[in-house]
Every structure is written in structure tokens, then in C-alpha cells.
Amino acid sequence: MVRESFQEQLSKLRNDILQMGNLVENAIDMAAVALVNQDLELAEKVVMEDDNIDRLQMAIESMCLSLLALQQPMARDLRFISTALKINTDLERMGDYARNISKIVLKIGSEPLIKPLVDLPRMAELAQQMVRENLTAFVKQDRDLALQAAMHDREINKLYKNTFTELAELMARDASTIKQSIYLLFIARYLERIGDHATNLSEWIIYMITGERLELGDMSSVVR
Amino acid sequence: MKMLKGGYMGNKNKMETRNLNLYYKGFQALINVSLPIKENTVTALIGPSGCGKSTFLRTLNRMNDVIDGTRIEGEVLLDNDSIYDVGVDPVVLRKKVGMVFQRPNPFPMSIYDNIAYGPRIHGHKKKDTLNEIVENSLRAAALWDEVKDRLHKSALGLSGGQQQRLVIARVLAVDPQVILMDEPASALDPISTAKLEDLIHQLKSNYTIVIVTHNMQQAARVSDFTGFFLNGEMIEYDVTNTIFTAPRIKRTEDYITGRFG
């Protein structure tokens, strides 16, 4: 095998991205649990631990930039490193949204909920699934799985619309729900954004595997 | 697959090989190589040592003719005419298809005479004409400003990078159409290399260039098309951007990512 140290660095980068993905997936999970159970301690934990995600993001970024500068990677190595650089940023943003959700939980977690929460936890679950499937696709070089991951974003978007309509009606009926409704709407929006970033993961992972640049926001253009 | 393609796909084939086989005594050095060389572009040939890329380059101006025991099958076309037809004079061909080698090889004479050498052989005697050719060639090779005050000094006093540009100027002086470069920067420092690469970029608007290089970053930087050679075969040919970001063939990928062997 040639260029062994380079290969070692690539495999460290792969592990770091996986760790980043796990941290983010956990953060989304914990934020959703904190929301449903009104668990302020857990919400606090998500906010604190976001610093770890930010630190790891910086480390991955530096590593990618050094590899680009020092190794001048080509072809699949180039696609791998650029994908790492891109999805690193998406993952970090997803972590930020999990933190934002937790900050809202800290604000509304002590008051009774205005409605039972069904769609929001479901959105969080789908978002985690997107991250998980994409990380598996990333490791196994599985284009189909990355595509499948992106498909869940449609459902997240549908749930977002439902939530919007439902909360808008609630606010129109009962002005005392407005404040919490707006907070919940923010949460729905954050989860919807997480779904969009998770779709970016699919796009870049597919690029890494095959070199194709797909626009998965518009699923009609995708060759399955 | 949606890929960014280079803008030169539509250029006509200045040269082309079809099913080119080259035998050297009992050994087959080139196997069925079919490659287009688009006009006003830079085509890079890459591959490990002994893969046939330099041998291939030499078939393009019949430099292999001078090696005993070499036999060729297939076609090599320049503007759609076979360069191996009986009526073709290799000397005239090499005027149209010039060559620059790995080590700069200035003649042991003045800078001026180096450039004027070819035109004189081809019958230019008038001093004014020669002066003009020398100046234009040196300007086109981005060397004029550095040597205009010492044209009649020995070319051997130039630096390696200057010597290599002098050799290019010497090729340009006989008004070629295609320039073949065999590892032209391998003996140059990074600054001379950068100048040479800039020069290649400028030259392609007037000439068609084929470059053999071991330096893949260089191939990626200077060329529009890249052909990957291995064991005498051309494995993959495509737009340079595609070869270096998403090649179709695994052997190409293994080579350019350093996983070879």
C-alpha cells in the first residue's frame, strides 16, 4: 500500500465525521425528549454539549484544509475530503438547531403545554433517521441509502405545514396560547431546517460515492 | 450523470490516432491507442514510468522512426491526413509538429542563433526577417524581456527555466501547429515551472499542445483533456476536470490517488 500515512489520516477523518454525526443525532434526540417530557435538565445538557460539537467542527475543518493543502488529493480522495468539509458544516448547523430547540424548552418547560405534542417528536425522529441513514451510507458507500434518507424530508415538510396550520388555528381561537404557540412554531421551523441540512448530507454523500451532483430538494430530477 | 464539461469538446481534432500499435523488436509498446487531440487545447498524457506515454508522444512527429526495429500499425492523422504516408517528409512534419524535451537542450551558440537556426535551415536568409522571427518567438515564449539585451551571448549562460523557454522559442520560430512536450518542467524549480505553465496556457490560443508529465498536479493545472496510459494502453481519456474529480475507471482512480501497486 502506498501513501499509508495519508490513508491513516483519511480514516481518522472518517471517524471524526462519524463522531460528529453521532453527537448531532444525540443532540436532536435529547432536545426532542426534553421538549416532550419538559425536562429542563436535559435541555440544559444539550445547550452545554453543543460546545463539543462546535469544537469538533473546527478540528474537522482544520484537518480537511491541511489534507487539501498538503496531500493535494484527487478523485475519490478529493470527493471524500470535500464531502467531509461540506457535511461537517451541515452537521454543525443541525447541532445549533438542537441547541435552539433546547433553549426554547428552557423557556416554556415549566408551564403546562397548550396541546399534546405528536408531530414535533415525529419530525425529530425522522430527522434523526436521516442523519443515521446518511452516516451509514457514508461509511458503506451506499448511494441508495443516501437517497432513501433524503426522502424523509418530504414527510418532515408535511408535518411542518400541519403544525403551522394547527398552531395558527389555536392562536386564532385562544389568545392566551399565542406565546407558547410561537415558541412551538419556532421549534417546528428548526426541525424543518434540520431536515433540509440532512438533505444536503445526502447530496454530498452521493457526490462522494459517484461524483454526481444532485439537487435533492427537487426530487423529480433524481434518477433512482 | 450531470457533470461539468470543459468548453473544448467541440474543437476539431487537430491530430488523432486510430488503433495505434507500436512494436519495438518483439515488444509491443503501444496497444490499440485511439486518441483525439483537439485543436487549441492542451492534452496531458499521464501514467507510470514505462506505460508508453512518451513513446506515444514520439509517434506524433515520427521521432520513433529513428529507432531501429520500430514498427507501427494503425493511423496517426494531422488535419485528417496520415503522417506515415509514403509522401510525407518527416523533416517537414517535425516543423509542423515541434517537440520540447525533458532537459532543455540549447545549442552551444548565441541566444539569437539558437532561435534563428531553424528558420535559416528552412531558407530564411534576410536579416530583417530573422530579427523579426527571433523577437516574436522570444516574446511568445515569454523570454524576450529577460534576454533582449544579451541576444548575442551564449544560450548556455541562461538559467534552466530560461533555457527551457528558449527551446520553446526555438520551436515557435519554425511556425509549428502542434507542440509536443515531454516532461518539460521536470528539471525546473517551482518558479520556472509556474512561468512555463503560464506560457503553455498562453500558447494554446495559437497552437495545439500535448504534454507528457509525471506531475499530476501539473497535468490538472495546465490541461483541458487528459489521457491515462498503463502498460501501453490508453485506459481513460476525458475532460481533465472529470479525470481528476470523478474518473470512470478504477485503474485511473487508483493511479491518480496514489493507490497503485
Image (tube, coloured by chain):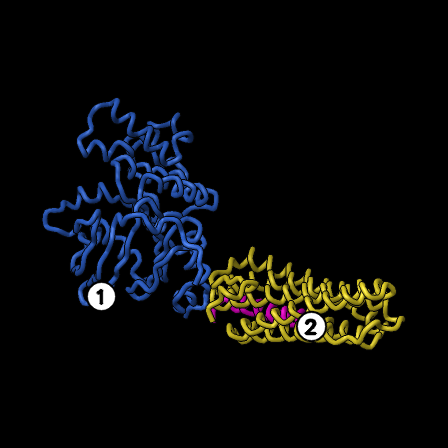
Chain colours: A yellow, B blue
Left or right of A124 in this view: A4? left
Mark 1 surroundings: few (<14), some (14-19) or many (≥20) residues within 10 A: some
**Which dot marks residue A188?**
none
- Identify the residue at image location x=61%, y=72%: A152
- Identify the residue at image location x=30%, y=62%: B234
**Residue that numbered label 1 is attached to:** B28
Magenta range is: A1-24
Circles 1 and 2, Cβ within 8 Å, touching? The answer is: no
Residue A214 in sight here: yes
Left or right of A41 in this view: A58? left
Residue projecting furthest to the right: A110
Q: Amino acid at mark 2?
A: Met
- Identify the residue at image location x=53%, y=66%: A219
What is the chain letter for disc 1? Answer: B
Percent x, y of residue B22:
21, 61
Q: Nearer the viewer, residue B129 or B118?
A: B129
Left or right of B220 in this view: A19? right
Residue A202, quarter of picture:
bottom right
Quadrant assignment for the N terminus of chain B: bottom left
**Residue that numbered label 2 is attached to:** A123
Left or right of B128 in this view: A108? right
Q: Real-space Cα distance between discs 1 and 2?
A: 64 Å
- Identify the residue at image location x=74%, y=76%: A118
Secondary structure predominantly adopted by residues drawn in magenta? helix
Q: Is residue A20 magenta?
A: yes
Percent x, y of residue A143:
51, 72
